[in-house]
Amino acid sequence: EAGRPDASEAHIGSARGARDAAAAAAGEDEDRARA
């Protein structure tokens, strides 16, 4: 792993993307609950 920083960065990027997607889904749920 240490020799492949590109792999770890890609993992971090995908994890961040998943977190953003989850946050967006949660925001949509909150908007629906308010409506």
Image (cartoon, rainbow, N blue to C red):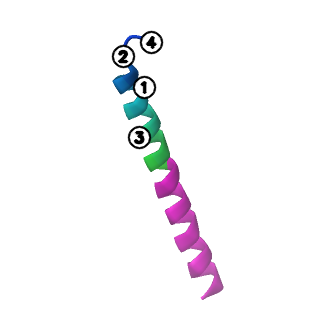
Q: Amino acid at mark 3?
A: Ser
Residue that sits furthest to the right in the current view: 34
- From the image, give the main secondary structure of the stretch colored magenta: helix
For label 3, the SS is helix
Q: Are marks 2 and 1 in contact (CB under 8 Å)?
A: yes
Q: Amino acid at mark 4?
A: Ala
Q: CA distance from mark 2 to mark 1?
A: 7 Å
**Which residue is disc 2 drawn over?**
4
Q: Earlier in the sequence, mark 3 or mark 2?
A: 2
For label 4, the SS is loop
Question: Per the image, is 21 magenta?
Answer: yes
Q: Are marks 4 and 2 in contact (CB under 8 Å)?
A: yes
Q: CA distance from mark 1 to mark 4?
A: 8 Å
Q: Earlier in the sequence, mark 1 or mark 3?
A: 1
**Which residue is disc 1 drawn over?**
8
**Callout 3 environment at 10 Å: few (<14), some (14 to 19), or many (20+)?**
few
Q: How far from the left and from the top, in percent, is residue 22?
A: 52, 55
Q: Amino acid at mark 2?
A: Arg
Segment colored magenta: 19-35
**Number of numbered discs visible in the structure rendering:** 4
Question: Per the image, is 9 magenta?
Answer: no
**Which residue is disc 4 drawn over?**
2
For label 1, the SS is helix
